[in-house]
Amino acid sequence: MKFLPAATLSAAKSCPTPVAIWQMLLTHLLSA
């Protein structure tokens, strides 16, 4: 879980799109 914030920040900086954020959240929920 500790990698989630870093990954989210990196994704936001690389490609600040709602789709990327949603995909990251969905992936986290599915993995959990």
Image: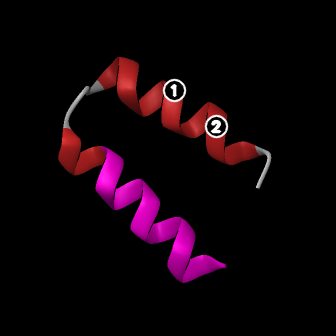
Quarter of the image holding residue 17? top left
Q: In the shown orientation, is residue 5 left or right of residue 24?
A: right
Neighbour tally class for label 2: few under 14, some 14-19, many 20 plus, Cα within 10 Å: few
Report the magenta residues as a range.
21-32
Neighbour tally class for label 1: few under 14, some 14-19, many 20 plus, Cα within 10 Å: few
Q: In the shown orientation, is residue 2 left or right of residue 10?
A: right
- Nearer to the camera, 14 or 8: 8
**Which image quadrant: the N terminus?**
bottom right
At 60% from the left edge and 78% from the top edge, which residue is drawn?
Answer: 31
At numbered mark 1, what does the secondary structure look like: helix, strand or loop?
helix
Q: Examine the residues drawn in magenta and state their main secondary structure.
A: helix
Image position, residue 8 (x, y; %): 50, 37
Question: Does 26 appear in magenta?
Answer: yes
Q: What residue type is labelled 1?
A: Leu
Q: Which amino acid does label 2 sit on?
A: Pro
At 44% from the left edge and 60% from the top edge, which residue is drawn?
Answer: 25
Residue 5 is labelled as: 2
Image position, residue 27 (x, y; %): 46, 69
Quarter of the image holding residue 3? top right
Image position, residue 7 (x, y; %): 56, 38
Residue 9 is labelled as: 1
- Contact (Cβ within 8 Å) of mark 2 with mark 1: yes
Image position, residue 14 (x, y; %): 33, 22
